[in-house]
Amino acid sequence: MSASTDPTHLSATALSALLGAREISAEEVARAHLARIDALEPEVRAFTQVFRREALAAARGLDDERRRGDVRGPLHGLPITVKESLDMAGMASTLGVAARSGHRAEGDAGVTALLRRAGAVILGRTNVSQMLLFNEARNPLFGQTANPWDLDRSPGGSSGGEAAAIAAGMSPLGIGTDVGGSIRVPAHCCGIAGFKPTLDRWTNKGSNTALLGQEAIRSQVGPMARSARDLALVMAELDPAAMAELDVRVPPFPLTEPASVEVARLRVGFYCDDGLVPSSSAVARAVVKAASALRARGATVVPFTPPGIPDAIYAYFAALSADGGATALSLMEAGDGADVDVSLRSLRTLASLPPFARRAAARVAGLAGERRLQRLLEVSGAKTVSDFWRITHALREARAAIASAMRAEALDVLLCPPYATPALPHTASRDFVLASSAAMLWNLAQFPAGVVPVSRVRAEEARRERPRDRLERRAAEVDARSEGLPVGVQVVGYPFCDHVVLAAMIALEDELAGEPDRPITPVSPPSLAG
């Protein structure tokens, strides 16, 4: 079977068209993807569960419906995968934590239920970082997911299993969640597309988190795929009125068609560095390349950096640590200690420190020239209620300041890095959390943001000059031997202008199509290539 006819090499949009024309059956599509899972999963380890029997039964039933003329829509018969943290009836959403293994969901998460209703065939559930708290996909229950571009690298996280499955052709569509880049960072690392909608544009009902009840920075469910058009397909097909019936937080109005946006009339801002962890050369070059691509489409493109980014990011960490780490620590302590992933051990140590010890550690970091670490330690730790309210107010002010500055420049969208580096070597996320700042900004701002693949790391970019401290030394370690890894660019827009973001993403993909260094998926792990 050639790549042009192999269902696992086709986009979700192309598969939908073939299914609609009855040139292929849902069962054939499902079997092809299950066969690819059989071939690649032993090395990639993207899945926590594969629903072989259930998927084939669902596909056959949907084929019967189509033969009778009962077609549910463009998702009818399309395979899809779902992040392990999203509820499925009768199953555990463990978040990679043994203490949650006895959890059993009473029903499907809202998005999962609507996908079934729309005719999607769920192939399986995908791996996560433990407690969804770091940018890899590894935990003691399900092991470590590898990046299909390089098995020694992580696919990112926490929706890393989704990204790896999609990049490897084991799934054409996936659903992830994002509280600090958990959709967008894996998309960047794996050379695929991912989208975090405006907060509550999609229902978050049944989406689990380790920090239950924490709402200063809320997680958002969103789609992942190999192209922005596929993202737009699934965004358009999940009925917002049905979502609003499930979840009163969802506004019941439809997504505006991205095709209605005139990209040539957009005013686009871009920046390559947010002032926290300097971007890798390849990441910065990709942003400039994306800016040039939209300029070639007729858009007006200007340099623009949002105000107050460092203060906003430290407020993000202050909010998430307001309980002193007690909630996360309680889950960690439910096991025997060996069940805590290596990337969370520093968090466990920090959560266990008394305030005076944390202050002392911050002073030592400052004296050693580790200013970013010093400030991170200073803002971490338990807060009083009044301190927490002050932080929440600061987050709201940051959101308003960013929107005001963008409007003052008459911007429609922004282009920026999704992450400071290319994909990390396994375990390198430990003590490297500030590398996610470019993605975290748009969680605290609650703006829609997506990532599209743009380029790959060149040989001369696989190095970093004169690192100043431990963060930059870690970034230099990541950059080393990164040649050939995919690099994405983040596209950001105003709340409820999701269609504008998707339109800009589609325009970027169209303009860059055929570029020799643009990442093309699916990709097979190097050991199986050819």
Image: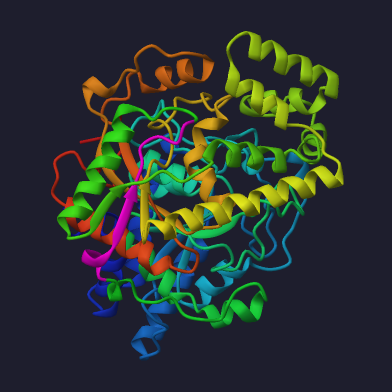
Give the side of residue 23 with respect to residue 213, left or right. Answer: left
Q: Quadrant of the N terminus?
A: bottom left
Give the side of residue 384 with respect to residue 467, left or right. Answer: right
Residue at (56, 81) in percent of width and height: 252
Question: Where residue 472 sits in the image (x, y, percent)?
Answer: 46, 19
Residue 14 appears in which quarter of the rendering?
Answer: bottom left
Give the side of residue 92 with respect to residue 420, left or right. Answer: right
Asked whether the viewer can see residue 412, the reply is yes
Question: Where residue 71 sits in the image (x, y, percent)?
Answer: 39, 85
Residue 264 appears in which quarter of the rendering?
Answer: bottom left
Q: Quadrant of the C terminus?
A: top left
Query: Of 412 and 51, which appears nearest the observer?
Result: 412
**Residue lying furthest bottom in this view?**
69
Asked whether the viewer can see residue 528, the reply is no
Query: Of 373 and 120, which appears nearest the observer?
Result: 373
Q: Is residue 244 magenta?
A: no
The total number of labels drawn is 0
Give the side of residue 461 with respect to residue 297, left or right. Answer: right
Residue at (30, 55) in percent of width and height: 8
**Residue lying furthest top in this view?**
368
Magenta segment boundaries in residue numbering = 262-275
Query: Of 147 and 295, which appears nearest the observer?
Result: 295
Residue at (28, 61) in percent of width and height: 506
Question: Where residue 153 sits in the image (x, y, percent)?
Answer: 42, 28
Specify the color scheme. Answer: rainbow
Question: Where residue 328 sits in the image (x, y, percent)?
Answer: 76, 38
* Residue 513 vertical placement versus 528 (above, below): below
Residue at (62, 22) in percent of width and height: 373
Query: Of 74 and 365, which appears nearest the observer?
Result: 365
